[in-house]
Amino acid sequence: MDIETFRDYCLSLKGTTEGMKWDHLCFMIEEKIYVIMSLEEGRFSIKCDPDEFDMLVARPGIQQAYHMAKRQWISLDSLDVLPDPELKSRVAESRTFVLRKLSKKVREKYN
């Protein structure tokens, strides 16, 4: 998947906004980041299910995300590490994990 297709997919998820933080492209819901990407390196991080963390970081090109909550965020070396369907699924899941932490009133706007 190329960066423009990835960007279009993220922005297609209801309530998603994009912005720059710490020189990284971020996709957010209610200003809460669910994807953070280094445009310079192509590396990006997403939230993951802690129960899947060990399985995910055992795969080539995936490791624990630096400076993020341990066992809750993974970093992928590039957009090509995962097949497109799995990448889309994991990004949507990351958004869901972030959304779940918001108030019920806010969550209802996006379901």
Image (cartoon, rainbow, N blue to C red):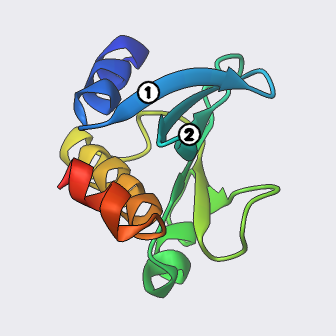
- Taking the spot 38% from the left edge, 53% from the top edge, the residue there is 95
Residue 31 in the figure: left or right of residue 98: right
Task: Determine crowd level at label 2: few under 14, some 14-19, many 20+ residues with C-alpha closer than 10 A.
Answer: few
Foreground residue among 81 and 39? 39
Residue 25 in the figure: left or right of residue 86: right
Q: In the rendered image, which residue does mark 2 sit on?
A: 31
Task: Determine crowd level at label 1: few under 14, some 14-19, many 20+ residues with C-alpha closer than 10 A.
Answer: some
- In the rendering, at what x and y percent does residue 94 appear? 41, 57
Q: Secondary structure at mark 1?
A: strand
- Taking the spot 81% from the left edge, 28% from the top edge, the residue there is 22
Q: Amino acid at mark 1?
A: Thr
Cβ atoms at labels 2 and 1 below 8 Å apart: yes
Is the N terminus in the top left, top right, bottom left or bottom right quadrant?
top left
Residue furthest top in the image:
4
Q: Amino acid at mark 2?
A: Glu
**Quadrant in which residue 74 is drawn:** bottom right
Q: Secondary structure at mark 2?
A: loop
Cα separation between marks 2 and 1: 8 Å
Residue 55 in the figure: left or right of residue 85: right
- Taking the spot 19% from the left edge, 45% from the top edge, the residue there is 85
Is the C terminus in the top left, top right, bottom left or bottom right quadrant?
bottom left
Foreground residue among 110 and 13? 110
Q: Is residue 96 above or below residue 100?
A: above
